[in-house]
Image (cartoon, rainbow, N blue to C red):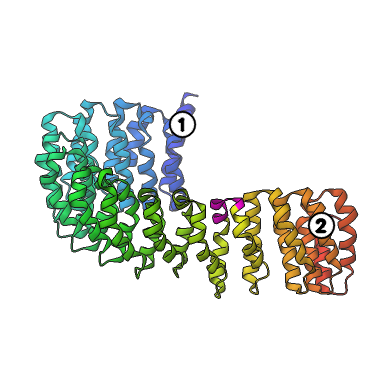
Amino acid sequence: MAGADSDDSLYPIAVLIDELRNEDVQLRLNSIKKLSTIALALGVERTRTELLPFLTDTIYDEDEVLLALAEQLGNFTMLVGGPEYVHCLLPPLESLATVEETVVRDKAVESLRKISHEHSPVDLEVHFEPLVKRLASGDWFTSRTSACGLFSVCYPRVSSTVKAEIRQHFRTLCSDDTPMVRRAAASKLGEFAKVLELEYVKSDIISLFTALASDEQDSVRLLAVEAGVSIATLLPQEDLEALVMPTLRQAAEDKSWRVRYMVADKFSDLQKAVGPEITKNDLVPAFQNLLKDCEAEVRAAAANKVKEFCENLPEDSRETIIMTHILPCVKELVSDTNQHVKSALASVIMGLSTILGKDNTIEHLLPLFLAQLKDECPEVRLNIISNLDCVNEVIGIRQLSQSLLPAIVELAEDAKWRVRLAIIEYMPLLAGQLGVEFFDEKLNSLCMAWLVDHVYAIREAATCNLMKLVEKFGAEWAQNTIVPKVLGMANDPNYLHRMTTLFCINALSEACGQEITTKHMLPVVLKMSNDQVANVRFNVAKSLQKIGPVLDSNCLQTEVKPVLEKLASDLDIDVKYFAQEAISVLALA
């Protein structure tokens, strides 16, 4: 019996080994994903002595299998016997951290960072730190890039001699021959600086930052910019000017647009890190240059930051700086040749109104908003309409209606149907921002006019728009404002408009609910079943099928069924077909 027991306990590892050696990648992947179950079955000792050595030896597989393995091992601490044995997980993860595929290496580093916190300070020095050193001095660049991500997790918890060694290794990697390694070091420089003592930030990190920021590869320089922002937050104000700003100034004017883009993208973080004085003297001119950059990507990134930058300016001089330095650049961007730049600006420009106040908004910003509302790029128009509410708060609804609404109405009646279509799509958004009273007064007639537009796509969009408006303003509003106008179209001499009535009823029945549908809409649909045009009659059948679920069963039997039966014996083949389909869908046969 004892023999059988031991055979049973060997069974899971035997299955695992078989599956891990199987030719089918999916089977190997599945067995890796079940590793924790297998480890539980084996127990902590055998997991340490059998499973982990086996996994370490078999690290040569498809990338997706290795990725799953790297992820699993990060959660293995308890399965090897808890924190005192966590170092047993280092050999397989070390191998995974040196493979060629970046995704696998990154996941192995992530797992190593995770389990580093579970090492005691002694284990960290005895097991983890030597692993970092081995990776940092590996022959292949893959292991050296992985090492860059591990310095910051072990540095705070080791002795000062080991700390000095770690700093030395990091310095070496920052000047590695391989650009990929320098790139990895640059990306972790800010993170490493945060765990260093201030004296070493000044003595070591600044020189590394300066060197990386003037690297020959722009992919290294742009990562150094991000590190520069992190370093700036660590230094006292008086050291910033001498230690960090010269390098960042140089980055803002770098010959590579990617580096300038990175400066623009991180500008708000930089502004918070350096404080008001440096912002006024250094960052304002730098920001102006970025807004006027020759590359559209850089201008777009800077335009995105306009509102945030202006919000964070020192209050005493905020308005002066914006009016004299920032607004002239913004005015130029409104008519930029690149639509991404205009779109980025349109998404934030409305926010300036709350910073500049009512008078400045009316005098300087409203003309810009108007220009953007008439822009040929739909994204720009949408971004302006989406943010009308913040202007509304500053200048009030009346002023807004006098200045911006005529432009919206003009677009709504534009000769190009695609422009009309774009405005219809923004209407529910606009309605929500302006409120029901204002909407009824100014925009309701527009929405009804679209229902009789000569382009079908507009009529269809207008129907959908009505449904969204009812969802926003409620069934009672629909009953008083929308439903009477829609039902009035049922007697229109143009059969296309009569059909639009049916499409509107289809869309509105669910939003308006049973009572309004039964009392007001259903009688009109039933009456239209006698229409002379076959297209209208078969759409009556389709409408009854659509609104049927909203009606109660008594109404279906007494009012809807007789009409559908009449239509099912219609002379027109399409009317017959749709009537029979409605009868079967509503189960009225």
Picture residue at 27% right of the left edge, 37% below the top = 90
Q: Which residue is mark 2?
A: 522
Which range is magenta? Answer: 429-437
Instruction: In the rendered view, tell whether residue 3 sits above or below residue 256.
Output: above
Residue 100 visible in this rendered orientation of the protein: no
Q: Where residue 72 appears, x then y in whole percent? A: 39, 39
Question: What is the distance, in whole Å, between disc 1 and disc 2 at their CAs?
Answer: 75 Å
Can you give x and y, in whole percent of width and height, for residue 212 in the image?
15, 52
Which residue is painted at 29% across and 61% down in the image? Answer: 328
Check residue 7 in the rendering and tell me which mark sits there, or answer none: 1
Which of the two residues, 561 or 120, is positioned nearer the viewer here? 561
Determine whether, in the image, residue 488 is placed left or right of residue 449.
right
Residue 159 position by quadrant: top left
The secondary structure that dominates the magenta segment is helix
Mark 1, residues whose alpha carbon is within 10 Å: few (<14), some, or many (≥20)?
Answer: few
Q: Amino acid at mark 2?
A: Leu
Specify the label residue 134 is tagged with. Answer: none
